[in-house]
Amino acid sequence: MRTPNSWTRLILLAAIAVLAHSGDANAQTFLNPGTTYSSAADSPFADLIAGGGVFVEDFEDLALEPGVTETSGVGFPIGPSAQTDSVDGDDGTLGDGGTGGSSYFSDFPDGTSTFRFVFDGPTLGGLPTHVGIVWTDVGNNDVTGVDGIGVVTFEAFDSVGISLGTTDIDPIGDGSTFGETAEDRFLGVIHFGGVSAIELSMDADDWEADHLQYGTPEPASAILLATGLTLLNLRRRSNA
């Protein structure tokens, strides 16, 4: 068990490590909390979103904001319907299955599909350093033959298009082909050298995502967030 003094030392060490880390444009931190995402308050970037440093694209206007394009050609925004699986809180009510909001939907028959979101630095005032997206649903799966369950992979790319790596959830899904929101999960990355694009892929042809998040917060805010994430990981390891 950690004592208060040992936790103080860990905090100082973590802060020093993050300060050093933040100056390394080649370093990256992938975020995969593994907990239900019901609203922007559940994002690892929640404080930065509240402060305006990170923007959330919720697709409620069925469009992407200037500075971001989706280039895969297999997806498009969809509005409320019995088959829609939006982030739960987007329609103003929690616990109603996510069918009352909008999402980004894959329609690519009989094949694994990938969403690729590309960020335009000049339009955005610089490439984002903090990027994430929320996976919300897999429906009828003609790829694996197992409806409502699959594997989702998140990949990020640096300022010149080189892969920074991946993180995934295997398996993901609750077996339902309708709404449902307890399965919704956030995947993201922090890379101080700038993120030019992200990809979200599934071994499925019928699935959805929501709450694309991106921004370049002030350095002090970014360091505080990274310090908190470092400490959370340290505490999880100490309790394991």
Image (cartoon, rainbow, N blue to C red):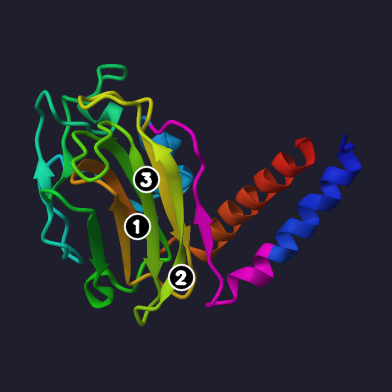
Picture coordinates of residue 159, whole percent (x, y): 37, 78
Contact, CB < 8 Å: mark 3 with mark 1? no
Q: CA distance from mark 2 to mark 3?
A: 20 Å
Residue at which label 3 appears: 151
Left or right, 1 with respect to 49, comes to right
Residue labelled with disc 1: 214
Q: Considering only order in the chain, which callout, 1 or 2, is on the residue closer to the N terminus?
A: 2
Q: Which mark is residue 164?
A: 2
Nearer to us in this view, 219 or 44: 44
Does 67 appear in magenta?
no
Q: Which of the image's four quarters has the C terminus?
A: top right
- Mark 3: which secondary structure? strand
Please provide percent x and percent y for residue 43: 43, 41
What kind of secondary structure does the magenta stretch mostly adopt? loop
Residue visible at 43% across and 31% down in the picture: 36
Depicted 226 relative to depicted 235: above or below: below
Query: What residue lies at 90% left-to-right and 37% top-to-bottom?
Result: 3
- Which residue appears at 43% of the width and 53% of the height? 188
- Pointer 2: residues within 10 angstroms few (<14), some, or many (20+)? some
Q: Which stretch is magenta?
A: 18-37
Residue at x 22%, y 41% (from the top left corner): 207
Q: CA distance from mark 2 to mark 1?
A: 16 Å
